[in-house]
Image (cartoon, grey):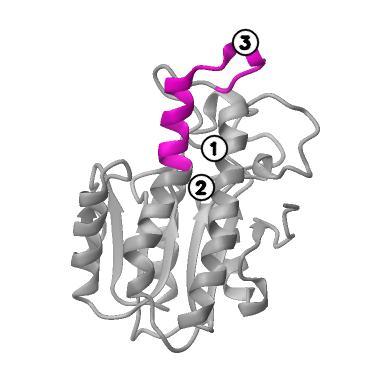
């Protein structure tokens, strides 16, 4: 991970499986200081990790979290590790007849609108000179070109919307921060609460533990350069089709 301890790192969604693993990985790397772990539930973290509350459905909460982070100086890395695939009243649709407007709105609120609002308040905190990164967990199923199975309307569409938001953001950010990198990240199939009903057993081939996925994602982030901005990359470094 190439950076400097003169900039901080922010993980949003730090109470989730991947989010917590990303916080641990960043702390172990020593590449950023301080490290902010932001989430709704604010779990405990080791000494030196700064925990703050944030709710992606509440812009005032996002603005307040950004204000707290701003006190530490320029930010070198922001990772949004939030997402919704299922919860009470929300589940991936197998067919058109299952579409529900309330469920779709909930999915878009967390997967697309929330990260856009995070960008609104956190991108201004990124260092204006030198390499900095704004990354959001996306998904391969958000690829329009790669969609061959159908189904999962809301989740697919919300991740496709997210990818377009990131592409658009990358163009704007380049005007004021030419060394900034804006990307989406596909973490693979991870043994987490988000994927539990839709994945094989945790020990099955191709299913990562959260710490494994986080290590892959941090490696990918460390290898990206400004020419990669605006794209989505999988856990193995491969570019995900648009």
Q: Residues within 10 Å of mark 3 (few under 14, many from 20)?
A: few
**Quadrant hosting residue 231:** bottom right
**Quadrant hosting residue 88:** top left
Magenta-drawn segment: 92-111
The residue mark sitting in front, 3 or 2, is 3
Name the residue that disc number 2 marks. Answer: 210
Residue closest to the eye, 16 or 117: 117
Name the residue that disc number 3 marks. Answer: 97
Callout 3 secondary element: helix
Instruction: Tell whether position 110 is magenta.
Output: yes
**Callouts 1 and 3 close, C-beta under 8 Å:** no
Callout 1 secondary element: loop
**Quadrant hosting residue 215:** bottom right
Report the Cα–Cα distance between label 3 and label 2: 34 Å
Report the Cα–Cα distance between label 1 and label 3: 29 Å
Q: Position of residue 147 (x, y in %)?
A: 76, 37
The residue shown at (51%, 64%) is 169
Instruction: Let me know if residue 220 appears in the view.
Output: yes
Q: Position of residue 123 (x, y in %)?
A: 39, 69
Name the residue that disc number 1 marks. Answer: 191
**Callouts 1 and 2 close, C-beta under 8 Å:** yes
Residue farthest to the bottom?
129
């Amino acid at each position: 991970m190439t950076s400097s301890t003169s900039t901080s790192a922010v993980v949003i969604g730090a109470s989730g499986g991947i989010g917590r693993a990303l916080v641990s990985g960043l702390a172990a790397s020593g590449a950023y200081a301080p490290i902010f772990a932001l989430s709704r539930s604010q779990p405990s973290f080791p000494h030196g990790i700064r925990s703050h509350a944030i709710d992606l459905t509440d812009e005032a909460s996002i603005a307040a979290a950004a204000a707290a982070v701003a006190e530490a100086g320029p930010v070198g890395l922001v990772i949004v590790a939030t997402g919704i695939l299922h919860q009470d009243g929300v589940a991936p649709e197998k067919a058109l007849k299952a579409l529900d407007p309330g469920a779709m709105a909930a999915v878009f609120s967390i997967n697309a609108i929330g990260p856009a609002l995070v960008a609104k308040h956190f991108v201004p905190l990124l260092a204006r000179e030198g390499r900095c990164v704004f990354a959001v967990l996306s998904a391969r199923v958000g690829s329009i070109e790669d969609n061959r199975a159908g189904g999962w309307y809301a989740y697919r569409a919300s991740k496709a919307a997210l990818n377009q938001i990131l592409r658009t953001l990358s163009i704007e950010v380049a005007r004021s921060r030419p060394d900034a990198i804006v990307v989406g990240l596909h973490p693979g199939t991870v043994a987490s609460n988000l994927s539990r009903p839709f994945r094989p057993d945790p020990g099955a081939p191709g299913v990562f533990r959260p710490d494994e996925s986080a290590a892959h994602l941090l490696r990918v982030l460390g290898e990206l350069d400004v020419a990669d901005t605006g794209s989505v990359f999988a856990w193995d470094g491969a570019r995900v089709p648009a």
